[in-house]
Amino acid sequence: MQKRVYFIMSKPERQTLLIVESLPPSRAEGLADLLEKVARTGWMDAYTARQRLVGRGPSLFAQGERRELVPMAVLLEDHKLRCWLIDPVTPLFAPARLRSLRITEDAIDFTTGSGPLRLERGMPVVAVLADTSGRAAEKNLKHLMAQRLYQGAGAADALADTALQRAILRAEPVLDLYLLAAEGGIQGAIRILPGGFDPAGLGARATLSGAGNLEQILDLTRSHAGSCTLSLDFGLANLPGCRLKNAEDGPRWQQDNLESLTRYGWLLVALAAGQTVTAAADATGFLAGELAPELTEIVREEATTQTGGSAAPETATQPGSLPPPPTAGREREVRHWLGLVFGATAGLGASLAAGGHQLLGGVITFGMRTGLLPASLAVACLWSGFYFLRLKRRIENTPTSKTRSLAMGLVEVQGRAVRKYALVAPMTQMPCVYYRLRKYRRDRNNRWVLSSASDSGHVPFYLEDDTGRVKVDPRRATVNTRTRQEGHGGQFNMLFGRSGGGDEKWIEDLVPEGTSLYVLGEATEFGLRRPALRTRLVTALQELKRDPDALSRYDTNGDGRICEQEWAYARADLEERLLHASLKAEAASATPEDRVIIRRPRQRSLPFVIAQSSSETHLTRRYGLYCLPLFLTALLAAVWTFMVVGGRTG
């Protein structure tokens, strides 16, 4: 009987997929040069590229016409990344459910709902062990988030294969086996569910556990197959049409997950039979001169230099050396209550606007008729303009200092942000020194409304330059960030760079660790609060007088009396001891970089600015641009006020 072999079919449009083997986060430090080159091509920004390159299993990096993707694939391969160029595949059938099996020395005979299938010894097999409930993927995510939190992004890694396989078997496992023919097609596919087949064929290998029997079949497949490619990454790998759903996605989420698992298996078979990028480039006749102009330069640079571009910022903190961030404390609670009061006030105003149109209209009409409304606008704009002008002048007139030679008072420091605590952004899990997270919900009018906000203003960090470090307390600071991420669908989608619809949206502004920072604030000493040395000396001398045994140590002539000269010696000895004890206590209470802290000035009129920038130029330019429209609006409002008042008096 002739065996039927099914080959991978592509969609009519034949839009090629560029699939890359993801790197674990612990090996992602060397991607800085590649990410810069990808950003220069204009294909995608560096953050998106990193999200698609870091993770588990195969990941969709880009899709489009083959001629456009080959140069990018060559660039990835030049950076030692394994990648494939394949056409989108259409599964011709789903794996057949296993009913029973029989094991012989030369083969494993499977009986399925669609007929018999045989795994002959030496036959290549692609095996997919997956959890369709999502619990294993969730456990891997929690493991990854915990590692990033306490060890830093450079040390974080996903679950090991043995641990992930154990987590899958403890959840809702499914084992798909794709039997491959010698010519590369699929000879048959089997889907094995725990408890869905007769385990008698396993003989002595049979267990009382359905998951245990599933594991035994996997071990038998490995021993019989000539080559067995096992994938545990369903639900973790970023491949088109293979998203893992949950109960919130609708009543058919379990059936949808099985269909996604089928597409995932066919894609893995296509990858197993796919050409290497180098072979694809040779087959299509791509030469360096035929590449896109932007990529030609990059590939040429790769051929002539070993390293290029800017390196990733060094991380001063070592993995595992950072303590957990401190709790928010009472100040955050006060800000929370202030937010509630503000929200209640805003709600009252909205209710007034919705239900009291006549009253609101009367107030506006009175303000316009009397000139109070334009006058208030003029005063507000004039005050704001002068505020930004004073801030601009203050920044320009404050000299830049080094951390080693900081004077107490208002200072301006520039350097690199370094974490003091194991702080990571809540959604993107990026190591950072500051984050601000805002959550929005869609209202009845399909508009985004802010529902909650949080930040890490209570977590100090270090600012490091070429002379040392200084501690920065960002509470009540004006923080200007340049890194913003926006996502839908929760932590899982944002962490793995996936987008999803819904009625919730998160916007996260953060200052990543290692970025260049500009800080303008007040430098103060940060030490233990203790009485002055003179006060402590007086107390120690009084205690000495009350202790005859201690006092006798200073009676050098042995006459039983403390003369004036002996008392002066006792006083000098106590003062020296207190001084040494004070210095020792200060050294033990804080590290050198913690002895000076930059915080909000006690004089409220002085600014406290933290900006993600290497210089003050963009700040002064920005504040200068703020002043012009504010002063212009104030002038127009003042003219408007005079016209209203003049019209009433005339």
Image (spheres, helix red, strand yellow):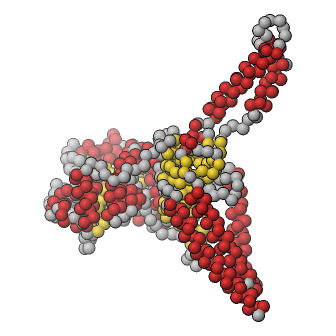
**Picture coordinates of residue 575, whole percent (x, y):** 73, 24
Counting every numbered tag in the picture gives 0
Above or below for 440 versus 539: below
Above or below for 306 versus 607: above
Judge from the rendering whether residue 343 lies leftward or rightward of residue 418; answer left or right: right
**Picture coordinates of residue 602, whole percent (x, y):** 70, 52
Give residue 650's quadrant in the image. bottom right
Is residue 35 visible in this depiction of the protein? yes
Residue at 56% across, 59% down: 396
**Picture coordinates of residue 624, whole percent (x, y):** 56, 68
Out of 364 and 233, give the one closest to the viewer. Answer: 364
Q: Residue furthest top?
A: 558
Judge from the rendering whether residue 191 lies leftward or rightward of residue 489; answer left or right: left
Q: Which residue lies furthest to the bottom in this view?
A: 650
Is residue 366 visible in this depiction of the protein? no
Judge from the rendering whether residue 304 lies leftward or rightward of residue 533; answer left or right: left
Q: Give the quadrant of the N terminus.
A: bottom left
Out of 617 and 439, give the one closest to the viewer. Answer: 617
Residue at 61% across, 42% down: 596
Residue at 63% across, 51% down: 410
Give residue 540's quadrant in the image. top right
Residue at 77% across, 30% down: 534
Judge from the rendering whether residue 129 lies leftward or rightward of residue 245; answer left or right: left
**Picture coordinates of residue 477, whole percent (x, y):** 62, 56
Above or below for 580 versus 137: above
